[in-house]
Amino acid sequence: MEPLSSDEVRYIARLANMRLSDAEVEQYRSQLTSILAHFQSLQQIDTTDVEPTGHATESNTVLREDIAGTALDQEQVLANAPFRSGEFIRVKPVLD
C-alpha cells in the first residue's frame, strides 16, 4: 500500500475538525497508513462461507418491556432542570 501523503492527512484532519502541527501530521500519516494497510490485508480473507453475525459471541440482552406511562407535566420537568429560561431548559452552548 502506498503511504498517505501529508495533504491527505490534513484533509482527514479537516473533516474531523482537528488542527494538527506538522509533527502531528507526520505521526498520524504513519499511523493511518499502517491502519489502512491492516484493513487492506483483512479484505483479502475469503469470507464467502461465513455467515454474517451481529455479534462475535452469543449475546442475550435483557431489556424491560417498553410500556408507555403517564407523562410529567411541564412544571415537573422544569423543576429538575439546573438552569431554565421561562418555559425552556437552558443548556451550555455547544457551538461557538
Image (cartoon, rainbow, N blue to C red):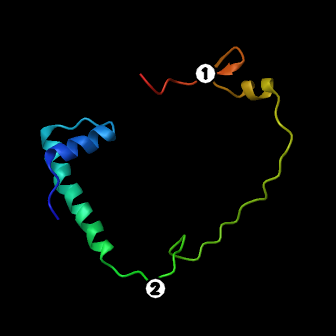
Q: Are marks 1 and 2 in contact (CB under 8 Å)?
A: no
- Badge 2: residue crowd in 10 Å (few <14, some 14–19, many ≥20): few
Quick check: 18 above or below 55?
A: above
Question: Element at badge 1?
Answer: loop
Quick check: 70 above or below 63?
A: above
Work out how far the residue at label 1 is from the one at label 2, CA to CA, in angstroms. Answer: 54 Å
The residue to which callout 2 is attached is 49
Residue 58 image offset from top left, x and y in percent: 58, 77
| Left or right: 4 in relation to 60 | left
Q: Quadrant of residue 87?
A: top right
* Farthest-out residue, top: 86
Q: Quadrant of residue 90?
A: top right
Quick check: 24 above or below 96?
A: below
| Left or right: 54 in relation to 95 | right
The residue drawn where x is 13% and y is 42% is: 23
Residue 65 image offset from top left, x and y in percent: 79, 58
The residue drawn where x is 28% and y is 38% is: 14
**Closer to the camera, 42 or 92?**
42
Q: Which is more N-terminal, label 2 or label 1? A: 2
In the picture, which quadrant includes the C terminus?
A: top left
Q: Which mark is residue 90?
A: 1
Residue 80 image offset from top left, x and y in percent: 71, 28
**Closer to the camera, 88 or 49?**
49
| Left or right: 19 in relation to 76 | left
Q: Specify the amino acid type for callout 1.
A: Arg
Q: Specify the amino acid type for callout 2.
A: Asp
**Closer to the camera, 55 or 15?**
15
Question: Element at badge 2?
Answer: loop
* Farthest-out residue, right: 70
The residue drawn where x is 78% and y is 54% is: 66
- Badge 1: residue crowd in 10 Å (few <14, some 14–19, many ≥20): few
